[in-house]
Amino acid sequence: MAHDTENLAIFRGLLKFKSNVQKIWGVLIFLSIVTTVEVILGIVKPESLMGMFLGMKILNWIFIILTIVKAYYIAWDFMHIRDEKGSLKGSIVLPLVVLIPYLCFILLLEADYIFEVMRTGFVSWNF
Amino acid sequence: MEVTANNTIDETNVWGGGNKPLKASYGKMMMWFFIVSDALTFTGFLVAYGFSRFKNIDSWPIADEVFTHFPFLHGVDAPMYYVALMTFVLIFSSVTMVLAVDAGHHMNKAKVTFYMLLTVIGGAIFVGSQAWEWKNFIKGEYGALETKGGQILQFMDAETGKRVALEAFATNIDSPRDTHLDSNGIWFIGESSLPNYSVEEVTGGFAVNESLVIKTEKIDETGHKVILSREESLLKINEAINVVEGANLIHNEYGNRLFADFFFFITGFHGFHVLSGVVINIIIFFNVIMGTYEKRGHYEMVEKVGLYWHFVDLVWVFVFTFFYLV
C-alpha cells in the first residue's frame, strides 16, 4: 500500500482527517466510546432494553451490533482494508460475511430445537 | 521477499510472479488468507458456544455473577470492570501497532522501534490479565453442591440476599475419607485432591443455619436465577452428591460445566494467539533495531505482523461480547 493512496475519511466522508496518524487516533477515540457505552449498558442493564426481539433481548442485539461496528472499524482502518483494491477486499470479506451468518443460523436454530425437545420431552434432565 | 522489493519488473512477465493483480504483495495476501481461515476457526468455536448456550438457555450461568473480581478490591463486587480494562489495553496496543506501521511507511526507524515496544508491553499486560482471570475462575469463590443430574446448587443468605461461601457454614465432621491416589487403589482411578468439605459437612451446616437458602441454575422470566424457599431448599439439598470448589473441565461451581469448558477453550485459544503474537512482535522488534528492514528498503514485515495483531484484537472484541456482555 503506497501511502499516497490512503483514504482519510471515516463515517462515509463525514469526518475527514488531515493525516493518517490523526485518523488512527480518531478511530481509537471512536472505539473507546463504543466500548464504554457497552460496559455502561452491561453494568446498568436498563429495564427498557430487556424486551425480547427475534428471540433475544434488545440489549443483546445492541451489544452484537456495536461489536460488529467495532469489528468494521478495526478491519477497515487498523488493518487498512479501506485502502485495498476492491477484488482483495471482496475475497477477504465475502467468505466471512456469507459463511459466518450461515453457520450461526443453522447451529442456533438446531440448538433452540434441542432446547424445546429437552423442555417438553418425557425425559427429565434434572434428577 | 525480493519480489516485493523489486520495483523494476518486466511488465510482460505476467506469469513469472511479477504481476500483482490485487495490488498486494505475496506475503501480505497470504497473511490475509490465513486470517480468513483463522476467523472461521474462531467462528466455529464461538458458534459452538452459542449452540450449547441456546440448548441450555434457561440455566446458563450469568457472566456478571461469575467474573466479579478486580485487583486489590477484595470482596468488592465489580463485574465487567476488569475485562473492560483488558479490552482497552488490547485496543490501545492495536493503536500503537498501527502507528508503528505508519511510521514504517515513512521509514522512521526510531518511531517504529518505540511503537513496537509499546505494542509488546500492551500484549504482555493482556496475557498477564488473562492469567489472573483464569486463576480467579479456577479457584472459585463460594463453592457449591452438585446434584446427581449435574445441576449446581449455590447458597444464599435469605436475609441479606448475598451469596454465602461453604467455609462460612460447613460443620466440621471428622471424616475417614482420604484422597484416593492411583497408587493405593485401582491404578486407573485416582483424584488429584478432595474438596475442603464433604457433602455431609455442608448439608449438616445447612440444616442448622436457618437463614440459608439454595440458589438454583434455573433462570426465571426476569433473567434472574431461581432462589428456593427454605422448605424447598431442605428437600433439594438431599439430591446433592458432590462438593464443587472452583472450576475445571469436569466440574464448575458457577453452573453448567460446558460454560467452564468453553471459557477455558476459547479464551485459552485466544490467549495462545496473543502469546504467539507477542513473541512474533518481539522478533520483529529486534529486527527493526538491527536495521533489517532499513536495509531491505521497506517495513512491510511490520505491516504483516500488524495484520495478525489487529486480528487478535478483533477476535477479542467478539469474545468479550459473547462471554461477558450478552
Image: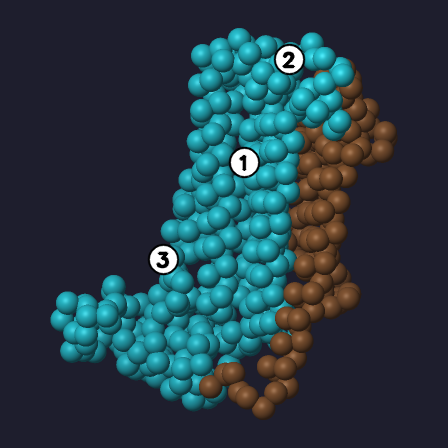
Chain colours: A brown, B cyan
Give how far across and how far down residue B210 sits, in percent: 39, 81
The image quadrant of residue B19 is: top right
Question: On what subunit does the disc labeled 1 rest?
Answer: B
Q: What secondary structure is found at the residue carrying circle 3? A: helix
Indicate which disc, 3 or 2, sits on the residue closer to the N terminus: 2
Query: In this rendering, which labeled residue sits more in front, label 3 or label 2?
Result: 2
Farthest residue toward the left?
A: B184
Which residue was labeled with disc 2? B6
- Which amino acid is tagged 1? Val
Q: In this rendering, would A125 be left or right of B26?
A: left
Query: Where is residue A78 shown, x and y percent of the image?
Result: 67, 30
Asked if the residue under mark 2 is in contact with the one under mark 3, i.e. CB atoms within 8 Å, the reply is no
Label 2 packing within 10 angstroms: few (<14), some (14-19), many (20+):
few
Residues flagged by tags 3 and 2 on a common chain: yes
Q: Which mark is residue B89?
A: 1
Local crowd size for mark 3, using a 10 Å CA cut-off: few (<14), some (14–19), many (≥20):
some
Residue at 55 percent across and 36 percent down: it is B90
Residue at 73 percent across and 68 percent down: it is A55
For the residues labelled 3 and 2, the Cα–Cα distance comes to 56 Å
Assess disc 1: are there few (<14), some (14-19) or many (≥20) residues with their C-alpha within 10 Å of its C-alpha: many
Q: Earlier in the sequence, mark 1 or mark 2?
A: 2
